[in-house]
Image (tube, rainbow, N blue to C red):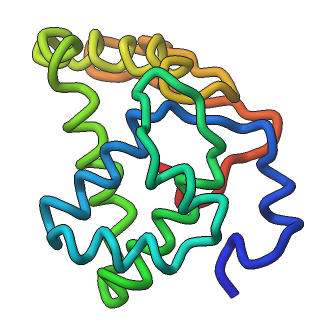
């Protein structure tokens, strides 16, 4: 049974929202790596509510339920990459690449401490739940800590 196959799991994350930019990055990932036919194939496997959200205009600054992202990720994994144990990492890396290029790109090219501090600062830009903090421990050590009232899904990237 997948993580979201029962209503209890969906209910658990009610009120957790992510920015549309994360959904747009996932859709772009499918299109770039598998083609437009695969976008349609993945969308067809989703519950109606998720499909309706993903087939309308997705606005990068709008909030969307995290469950839509979770369902989309699961569909990508199941339909397009069933034998790829690293698919969730690939989705997260692709999304970070898309979302951190553009306006934030100059900030990612400095030193690692500035990038990690930026990660904590941008946390609320991409999700409306939990908190993040950056602690510099030494010149070559740091801690970025994410604090959630309810842990997000294990495969949330």
Q: Which quarter of the image is occupied by the N terminus?
A: bottom right
Side of 86 relative to 45 (left or right): left
Q: Position of residue 16 (x, y in %)?
A: 72, 38
Q: Is residue 76 above or below residue 125?
A: below
Residue 68 horizontal/vertical position (percent): 59, 54
**Percent position (x, y) of residue 3?**
68, 73
Q: Which residue sits at x=65%, y=43%? A: 65
* Relative vertical location of residue 74 with respect to residue 126 in this rendering, above or below: below
Judge from the rendering whether residue 101 lies leftward or rightward of residue 127; answer left or right: left
Residue occupying image coordinates x 84% and y 53%: 12
Q: How many marks?
A: 0
The image quarter containing residue 67 is bottom right
Decide which of 83, 21 is in the foreground and name it.
Answer: 21
Residue in front for this viewpoint, 139 or 84? 84
Residue 124, by quadrant, is top right
Q: Is residue 5 left or right of residue 107?
A: right
Which image quadrant for residue 89? bottom left
58 is higher (above) or lower (below) than 108 = below
- x 20%, y 11%: residue: 103
Q: Is residue 48 above or below residue 95?
A: below
x, y percent for residue 42: 40, 75
Q: Residue at left 59%, top 59%?
A: 50
């Amino acid at each position: 049974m997948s993580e979201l196959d029962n209503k209890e799991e969906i209910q658990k994350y009610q009120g957790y929202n992510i920015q549309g930019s994360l959904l747009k990055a996932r859709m772009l990932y499918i299109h770039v790596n598998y083609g437009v036919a695969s976008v349609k194939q993945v969308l067809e496997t989703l519950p109606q509510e998720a499909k309706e959200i993903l087939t309308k205009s997705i606005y990068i600054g709008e909030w969307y339920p995290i469950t839509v992202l979770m369902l989309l990720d699961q569909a990508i994994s199941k339909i397009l990459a069933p034998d790829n144990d690293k698919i969730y990492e690939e989705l997260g890396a692709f999304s970070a690449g898309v979302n951190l290029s553009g306006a934030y790109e100059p900030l990612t090219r400095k030193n690692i401490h500035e990038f990690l501090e930026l990660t904590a600062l941008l946390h609320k830009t991409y999700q409306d739940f939990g908190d993040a903090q950056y602690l510099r421990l030494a010149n070559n050590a740091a801690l970025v800590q994410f604090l959630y009232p309810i842990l997000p899904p294990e495969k949330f990237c």
